[in-house]
């Protein structure tokens, strides 16, 4: 029995379990051409959100379509260890239990981190299954898996030995909440309203002051100079003098350097080398003292004097008040400035001098620039992101790859002494010992004498190897999987990680494999609400994905998301879109039930059915060409819309009506078999988008073995088609629409047959006449040479159609109605023509407005001609 309603909840679990049981998602190398996608690994502790829903639906569409087209489809899933985010969650959990991270050893902390990961780590992947994602779950990877970590360590050692990785004392971006450094790309700059404080520094040995403006008065405690432009005549008398820093009363030199802009502010600049990258450069040039006033959590240290232990923002207010009491605060102004914040923790970034590990990018980046911007070996969709890609790569800075965290791959550098350069780099401590012994000529050294660098590597330094490492390509580049599946085909991700991840994977691909990691990059937009706001829990505008699936079904949600998701453009999400997807699923289900409800008999095939089948086969082929073109250009939303229109309009609204048997009449077997064949072709096109619904219908159509499941069926093949047949039907459809309009307007019941007389000025094809007769319920269709009196009439292009009305309608009433409609239309025409006769209006109105008015005039004239003709034929 076929259920009256499509029950998504029952169907989804049933078919996902069936697909898993029959191992359809698993891939292994064989004779077929591979099609490979690696998932952008979500954070291991994450849960499904709308961005994941969109991204993974797109990937599933691509992978299911490739499977249907005969490729050996492989979609590798996995998760990212997300060092900063995960460590923060573990630290917070420990804190709630009264445990301080600093009281634990690294090994003890990592045990807690692994416990957390094992408890929450599989959640998001399980949720992806509810969406229908057909990942090869046997290949699931985690960036902290032993082989994945070994790949990261090997790449670090390799790049160090090549001279690309070095240790440097640099100004870095410090996240005081995560207590780690960040790369430049992990800092988000936001405009914030703040204050500009004008501070007075006394010149030593005089009553004179210089005024300096700063947004950060707390940093005066780290000042080691005042800098002035050497040509600034206002201050030439201060050469060789010193100034006194308020509060701490430190005496600092007044230096002169062309770096200062004489026109900006007072022309005097406070120099704090420990807390500003430009000040550090000045400090090095003038050999200034470096005073770091902050602890790693951005509280003040002993250099903060009586503010020691207090937070920087608390100190800012307090120190401003103290400066005012001292008479050292000249004035305060409101000030809008850009503030760097941590992409992960949202904390305000603190510039800080620190010993860190860096990866030199100047040479490594060259093949990645060439591949996208010159040879186009790799294509970004949409291509407008090429400019963004170019800007970042051509202005790239060395990558700070060390993080002051424990969760992540520990940097494989081993110190054997107290000096900064007393280290070796090796994959294991045993290898490190040999290198240390050789470097020092001290063969008495033991592993216990070595101390591994405590820092972990940036998470992105792990995930930039993802497309290679998941196939073992770093540890064993000659293995069968890597040689078969790499390079992968498509990458689907968001433009927000074009730098963090996409560009870096390209760089790594050329460095380690000598070739691209993927061919196409499909950049999705952000999912926003219908007010264009970014979805977030704080705004309360982000729906719960699993609740949407429960309400509308996974297929409905997938269709709703994809219909609004053009590449690279933000998606304005509205739940109504999912409701539309659900309605589409019900439409297909009801069409299937209609076909299966017909009684089949051995009867001759009607001419109208034969013509309908020929037309739909041509229409299907025409759509296939369009769909292929959309997929080639990664216009998945357009591809789905083309299929949507094919199924809803052409198949359900036209084809099924054209072949439907009369009331309580059977259908001939040849037509029924073709209807099933066309339905199955539609299901193949729809399957990548609506996998559950289509598999359910497919299995209801006939008894199928696991080898005959829809998920592995053959995608429809492109063949030649008759375009003229499609054009002829479009004309015939207008003829049918005319008959239906007259029936509706004149209340002529569909069961009452009418005659149709045609003056064929267009020499239109008569091929679809049998269809016109059936769908119009015509008693006869005749071609005539002259107009027919006593008939209702309409036009299609220059063709004239007449429906004799004797016995069907009240002629007097119809004449009265048409006369009224004629008067109204003539009045409308006069108003339009009055506008067009107004020279001032025509001269001043936009071109589009004039074009609209001319179209109104033409439509009104055509309508008047038709009404007049109908009146003449009735009189």
Image (cartoon, rainbow, N blue to C red):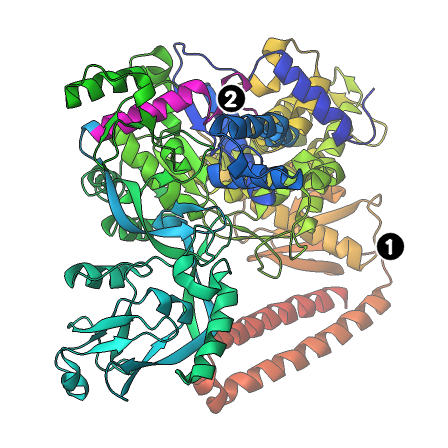
The C terminus, quarter of image: bottom right
Q: Is residue 551 magenta?
A: no
Disc on res. 807: 1
Q: Are marks 1 and 2 in contact (CB under 8 Å)?
A: no
Percent x, y of residue 694: 65, 27
Q: Which residue is mark 2?
A: 140
Q: In which image quadrant can residue 669 be found?
A: top right
Q: Residue at x 31, y 35 (%)?
A: 506
Crowd rating for badge 2 (residues with CA inside 10 Å; few <14, some 14–19, many 20+) = some
Q: Nearer the viewer, residue 807 or 17?
A: 17
The answer to whether residue 163 shows anywhere in this view is yes
Cα distance in 3D space between marks 1 and 2: 74 Å
Label 2: element kind? loop
Q: Is 621 displayed left or right of 595 in the figure?
A: left
Q: Nearer the viewer, residue 226 or 444?
A: 444
Q: Residue furthest front?
A: 205
Percent x, y of residue 680: 62, 24
Label 1: element kind? loop
The answer to whether residue 650 shows anywhere in this view is no
Q: In which image quadrant can residue 599 be found?
A: top right
Above or below, comparing residue 704 to residue 683 in the picture: above
Percent x, y of residue 543: 68, 47
Q: In which image quadrant can residue 584 be found?
A: top right
Q: Is 410 displayed left or right of 318 in the figure?
A: left
Magenta span: predominant SS is: helix
Q: Which residues are magenta?
A: 134-160
Q: Is residue 142 magenta?
A: yes
Q: Nearer the viewer, residue 586 or 258?
A: 258
Percent x, y of residue 869: 67, 66
Q: Is 762 displayed left or right of 450 in the figure?
A: right
């Amino acid at each position: 029995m076929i259920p009256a309603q499509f029950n998504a909840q029952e169907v989804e679990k049933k078919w996902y379990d069936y697909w898993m049981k029959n191992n359809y998602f698993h891939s292994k190398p064989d004779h077929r051409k591979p099609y490979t996608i690696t998932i952008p690994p979500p954070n291991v502790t994450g849960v499904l959100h709308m961005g994941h829903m969109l991204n993974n639906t797109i990937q599933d569409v691509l992978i299911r379509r490739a499977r249907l087209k005969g490729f050996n489809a492989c979609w590798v899933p996995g998760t990212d260890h997300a060092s900063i985010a995960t460590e923060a969650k573990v630290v917070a959990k420990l804190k709630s239990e009264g445990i301080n991270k600093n009281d634990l050893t690294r090994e003890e902390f990592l045990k807690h981190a692994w416990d957390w990961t094992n408890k929450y780590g599989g959640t998001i992947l399980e949720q992806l299954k509810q969406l229908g994602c057909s990942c090869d779950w046997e290949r699931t990877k985690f960036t902290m898996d032993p082989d994945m970590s070994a790949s990261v360590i090997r790449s670090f050692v390799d790049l160090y030995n090549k001279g690309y990785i070095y240790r440097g004392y640099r100004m870095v971006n410090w996240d005081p909440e995560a207590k780690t450094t960040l790369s430049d790309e992990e800092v988000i700059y936001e405009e914030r309203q703040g204050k500009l404080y004008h501070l007075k520094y006394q010149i030593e040995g005089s009553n004179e002051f210089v005024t300096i403006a700063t947004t950060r008065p707390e940093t005066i405690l780290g000042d080691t100079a005042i800098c002035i432009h050497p040509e600034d005549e206002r201050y030439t008398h201060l050469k060789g003098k010193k100034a006194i820093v308020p509060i701490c009363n430190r005496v600092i030199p007044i230096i002169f350097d062309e770096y200062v802009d004489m026109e900006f502010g007072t022309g005097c600049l406070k120099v704090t080398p420990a807390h500003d990258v430009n000040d550090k450069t000045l400090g090095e040039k003038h050999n200034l003292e470096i005073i770091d006033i902050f602890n790693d959590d951005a509280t003040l240290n002993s250099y903060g004097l009586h503010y020691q232990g207090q937070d920087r923002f608390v100190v800012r207010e307090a120190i401003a008040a103290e400066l005012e009491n001292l008479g050292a605060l000249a004035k305060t102004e409101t000030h809008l400035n850009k503030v760097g914040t941590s992409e992960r923790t949202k904390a305000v970034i603190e510039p800080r001098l620190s010993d860190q590990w860096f990866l030199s990018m100047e040479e490594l980046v060259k093949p990645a620039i060439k591949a996208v911007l010159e040879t186009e070996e790799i294509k970004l969709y949409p291509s407008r992101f090429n400019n963004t890609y170019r800007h970042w790569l051509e202005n790239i800075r060395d990558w700070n790859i060390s993080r002051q965290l424990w969760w992540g791959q520990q940097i494989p550098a081993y110190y054997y002494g107290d000096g900064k350069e007393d280290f070796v780099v090796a994959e294991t401590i045993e290898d490190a010992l040999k290198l240390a012994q050789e470097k020092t000529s001290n063969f008495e050294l033991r592993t216990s004498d070595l101390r591994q660098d405590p820092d972990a590597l940036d998470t992105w330094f792990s995930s930039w190897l993802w497309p290679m490492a998941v196939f073992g390509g770093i540890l064993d580049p000659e293995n069968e999987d890597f040689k078969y599946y790499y390079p992968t085909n498509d990458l689907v991700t968001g433009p927000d990680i074009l730098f963090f991840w996409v560009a870096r994977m390209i760089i790594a691909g050329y460095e380690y494999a000598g070739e691209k990691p993927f061919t196409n990059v499909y950049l999705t937009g952000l999912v926003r609400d219908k007010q264009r706001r970014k979805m977030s829990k704080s705004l309360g505008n982000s729906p719960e994905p699993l609740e949407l699936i429960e309400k509308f079904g996974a297929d409905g949600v997938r269709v709703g998301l994809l219909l609004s998701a053009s590449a690279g453009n933000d998606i304005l999400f509205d739940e109504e879109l999912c409701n539309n997807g659900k309605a589409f699923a019900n439409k297909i289900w009801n069409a299937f039930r209609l076909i299966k409800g017909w009684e089949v008999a051995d009867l001759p095939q009607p001419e109208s059915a034969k013509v309908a089948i020929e037309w739909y086969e041509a229409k299907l082929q025409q759509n296939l060409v369009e769909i292929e073109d959309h997929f080639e250009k990664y216009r998945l939303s357009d591809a789905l819309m083309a299929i949507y229109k094919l199924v809803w309009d052409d198949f359900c609204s036209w084809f099924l009506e054209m072949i439907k048997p009369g009331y309580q009449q059977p259908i001939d077997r040849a037509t029924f078999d073709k209807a099933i064949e066309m339905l199955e072709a539609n299901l193949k096109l729809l399957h990548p988008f609506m996998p559950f619904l289509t598999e359910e219908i497919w299995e209801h159509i006939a008894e199928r073995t696991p080898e005959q499941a829809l998920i592995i069926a053959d995608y429809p093949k492109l063949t030649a088609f008759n375009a003229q047949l499609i054009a002829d039907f479009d004309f015939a459809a207008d003829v049918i629409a005319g008959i239906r309009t007259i029936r509706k307007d004149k209340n002529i019941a569909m069961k009452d047959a009418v005659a149709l007389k045609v003056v064929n000025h267009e020499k239109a094809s008569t091929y679809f006449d049998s269809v016109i007769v059936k769908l119009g319920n015509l008693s006869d269709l005749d071609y005539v040479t002259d107009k027919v009196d006593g008939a209702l009439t309409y036009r299609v292009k220059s063709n004239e159609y007449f429906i004799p009305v004797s016995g069907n309608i009240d002629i007097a009433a119809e004449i009265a109605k048409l006369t009224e409609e004629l008067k109204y239309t003539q009045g409308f025409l006069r108003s339009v023509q009055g506008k067009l006769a107004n020279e001032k209006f025509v001269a001043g109105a936009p071109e589009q407005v004039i074009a609209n008015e001319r179209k109104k005039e033409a439509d009104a004239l055509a309508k008047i001609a038709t009404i007049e003709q109908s009146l003449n034929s009735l009189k």
